[in-house]
Image: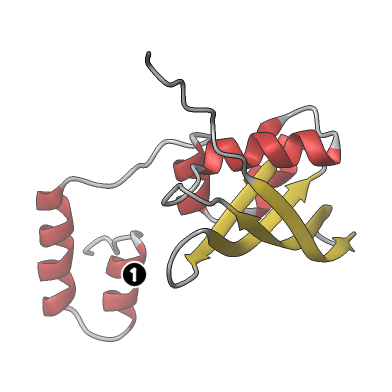
Amino acid sequence: MAEVEAKPKIRVRTRCFMTNPLLCRKQFAVEMEHPGIGTVMKKQLRAKLAQMFKVKDKDTIVVYGFKTAYGGGRSTGFGLIYDTVALCKRYEPTYRLVRMGLKKKRSPARKQKKEKKNRAKKARGMKKVKILRGSVAKKK
């Protein structure tokens, strides 16, 4: 007789809940208990939070900064729920948007980075600043 393992239950609790009208979001600390599992995937957690707060679009929910307690079974982190996806894209850092799949990672080629670094080594003052910012000063 083969035993069928039931999915372990994940309990999610929020605390320090506050509404931030300036950034059009709700922010809170997330505590979750997940006995028998190492860590919970963020997609799973976002789905659970969407169900708890009755959010239609899961892309408006951002979770980050999770630390697992020693011995496992319990994690704490932070969560944000934006009013719209557009506001989420506006206020969230690019690296978090890339992790969520809302933005593509764009970086220059390795050779371009090295050439820029070497050009900056030769320049001084405001010329160096312009090179590093990307607006290269034209020679007269």
Question: Do we see residue 86 in this rendering?
Answer: no
Colour mapping:
secondary structure
Quadrant of the image occupied by residue 49: top right
Assign the C terminus to one quadrant of the image: bottom left
Q: Position of residue 107 (x, y in %)?
A: 29, 47
Q: Nearer the viewer, residue 118 or 105?
A: 105
Q: Is residue 56 left or right of residue 114?
A: right
Residue 36 in view, yes or no = yes
Using residue 60 as the reference point, say whether residue 20 is left or right of it: right
Residue 64 place in picture, x, y as percent: 55, 57
Kindly identify the residue that appears in the image at 46 percent across and 48 percent down.
36
Work out whether residue 140 or residue 51 is closer to the camera in this orientation and state it: 51
Q: Position of residue 100 (x, y in %)?
A: 51, 39
Q: Is residue 57 left or right of residue 6?
A: right
Which residue is rendered at x = 66% and y = 34% of the image? Answer: 47
Q: Residue at x 11, y 60 (%)?
A: 114
Q: Quadrant of residue 76?
A: bottom right
- Local packing at callout 1 (Cα closer than 10 Å; few below 14, some 14-19, many 20+) is some
Res 50 → quadrant: top right
Query: From this viewpoint, which residue is outermost toward the front?
Result: 1
Above-or-below relation of 75 to 8: below
For the N terminus, which image quadrant?
top left
Q: Which residue is found at the position 21% from the left and 63% from the top?
A: 139
12 vs 112, left or right, is right
The amino acid marked with disc number 1 is: Lys
Label 1 element class: helix
Residue at the spot of label 1: 130
Q: Is residue 34 above or below residue 52?
A: below
